[in-house]
Image (spheres, rainbow, N blue to C red):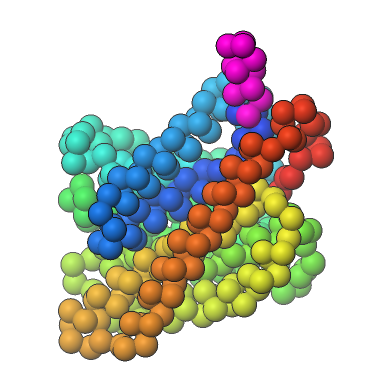
Amino acid sequence: MESDEKNQIGRMLFHLPLPITAVALSIASLGNLLEAYLEGVRLFCGVLAFLLILAFTAKILIYPERFREDMKNPVMASVFCTYSMTWILLSAYAEPCLGIAAKGFWYFSIGLHALLVLYFTKSFMMKPVIPRVFACYFIGYEGFVTASVTAPVFEELLVGQAAFWFGFGMLFFLLTLITYRYVTMPKVRDSEKPLFCIYTAPPGLCLTGYLNAFPEKSLWIAGFLSVLSLFMYGMVLSRMPKFLRLPFYPSYASFTFPFVISATGMKLMREFLMEIGRPVRILDFIVPVQMGIAVLLVTYVLLRYLLFLAGAEWKKNTPRESLPTL
């Protein structure tokens, strides 16, 4: 009986999709978003994100060949940058308990993220193949701004500010490259369609990082990022009904973090405008709606992942090629 349970856990880990790291990132981010509204929700989200990222770490260690195979795919390699982003956020979660050790792990996670971005750049960006470019190409380069979001926790604002300027600068280059791909080659496979949702993450992440890492804020920069974030958000949200009718794919993870970080950025922008005495009342409506959508989508995607892992596919040793993939 014990052997059967171990084999069952092993098969489940074997079929654990790499994009679960993006779901973990969204849950950790959701804890930060909801902290002021629900007591204990941040701790719950932090523990859940930690368990998910720990499970995928176990998969890397137990099935390294499967991981190496995934990393040969540009979509998977770009999405895996959410792994280090999650650890950056979780380091901030751990700071009250671990202090200087958490700060050390924060720096380690930023360094790990840099290595992942270097790998992705060398492998897939030196000569980008346009048909294989998707919105997930934003993730690695914009992911550095996660350090801006968490920098105040460790009193490392200069690090956070440097990370923001890098992400802000790369935003324009990547926006041009990725938009060119979608405009000139709009047809993508069903499994790749959810990746379009990642469009809304970069401006939301940059806005959140900027408002967190800069004591003296420019209304022009914050305003520009807010308008861009809302535009991208509306563009993505208009396509969500079609995306949600798709069969389950691991790329469903794209429905999570972009919506959470967009809501976080607009929430901070609303608070900033109130602080400087220039409130925008429409945000009193937009922010709660964005937060509600973020909670619903993260919950829905997590349930779909759990149903997939609890389903018959991996229990029956279904061949990998017949499983939902990117």
Q: Residue at x 52, y 43 (%)?
A: 21
The image shows residue 140 at horizontal and vertical percentages of: 51, 51
Q: Residue at x 60, y 18 (%)?
A: 5
Residue 90's place in the image compared with 159, above or below, is: above
The foreground one among 137 and 63 is: 63
Quadrant housing residue 11: top right
Q: Residue at x 19, y 72 (%)?
A: 216
- In which quadrant of the rendered image does the N terminus lie? top right
| The magenta stretch spans residue 232 | no
Residue 6's place in the image compared with 33, above or below, is: above
* Residue 170 visible, this angle: no
The image shows residue 90 at horizontal and vertical percentages of: 34, 42
The image shows residue 145 at horizontal and vertical percentages of: 38, 57
Q: Is residue 145 left or right of residue 123?
A: left
Q: Is residue 143 left or right of residue 47?
A: right
Q: Is residue 38 left or right of residue 198?
A: left
The foreground one among 24 and 69 is: 24
* Residue 313 visible, this angle: yes
Quadrant housing residue 320: top right
The image shows residue 268 at horizontal and vertical percentages of: 30, 70
Residue 159's place in the image compared with 282, above or below, is: above
Q: Residue at x 64, y 52 (%)?
A: 251
Q: Main secondary structure of the magenta part?
A: helix
| The magenta stretch spans residue 6 | yes
Give the residues in magenta. 1-12
